[in-house]
């Protein structure tokens, strides 16, 4: 009974997170404006999700305990691109996206290197 309840909670959390940012993204697309969205708060939220995800991965927690983070990160990146697009600053998005991608790959490679070193 407890396992079924836990499974239901995990999957319902994933379902809610999959739709969490969709209303905001659709509102921005419908209005064709990013007015009212704070770029700094969006970047702070994105950084928080990346740090949390990295922490969970590093310490080997079960994927169902943090699987909502990649979903939220993807939605935040889409929203970030919409903000840059509708503000007319698409070229300014490149450094932000590059930093996100590089930080993720660097942290992932660091974990792989540590795992390889511990196996030897």
Image (tube, rainbow, N blue to C red):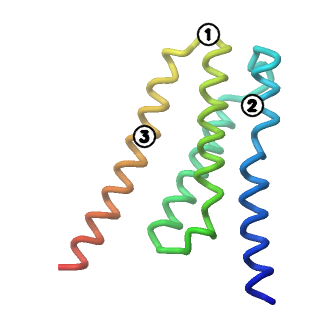
Coordinates of residue 111 in the picture (x, y in percent): 34, 64
Mark 3 in CB contact with mark 1 (< 8 angstroms): no
Nearest to N terminus: mark 3 or mark 1: 1
75 with respect to 105 (left or right):
right
Write down the residue under mark 1: 88
Report crowding for label 2: few under 14, some 14 to 19, many 20 or more residues within 10 A (C-alpha).
Answer: some
86 shown above or below 58: above
- State the separation of the CA atoms marked 3 and 1: 22 Å
Mark 2: which secondary structure?
helix
Coordinates of residue 80 in the picture (x, y in percent): 62, 30
30 with respect to 38 (left or right):
right
Write down the residue under mark 3: 101
- Residue 52, image quadrant: bottom right
Tell which of 64 and 112 is nearer to you. Answer: 64
User: Which residue, as the protein is rendered here, is positioned at the far top?
Assistant: 88
- State the separation of the CA atoms marked 2 and 1: 17 Å
Residue under the image location 30 percent in, 64 percent down: 112
Write down the residue under mark 2: 25
Residue under the image location 73 percent in, 66 percent down: 11
User: Which residue, as the protein is rendered here, is positioned at the far left?
Assistant: 120
């Amino acid at each position: 009974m407890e396992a079924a309840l836990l499974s239901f909670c995990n999957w319902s959390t994933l379902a809610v997170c999959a739709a969490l940012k969709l209303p905001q993204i659709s509102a921005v697309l419908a209005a064709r404006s990013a007015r009212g969205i704070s770029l700094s708060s969006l970047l702070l939220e994105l950084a928080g999700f990346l740090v949390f995800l990295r922490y969970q991965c590093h310490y080997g927690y079960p994927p169902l305990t943090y699987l909502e983070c990649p979903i939220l990160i993807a939605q935040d990146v889409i929203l970030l691109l919409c903000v840059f697009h509708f503000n007319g600053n698409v070229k300014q998005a490149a450094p932000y996206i590059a930093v996100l991608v590089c930080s993720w790959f660097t942290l992932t490679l660091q974990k792989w290197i540590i795992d390889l070193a511990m196996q030897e």
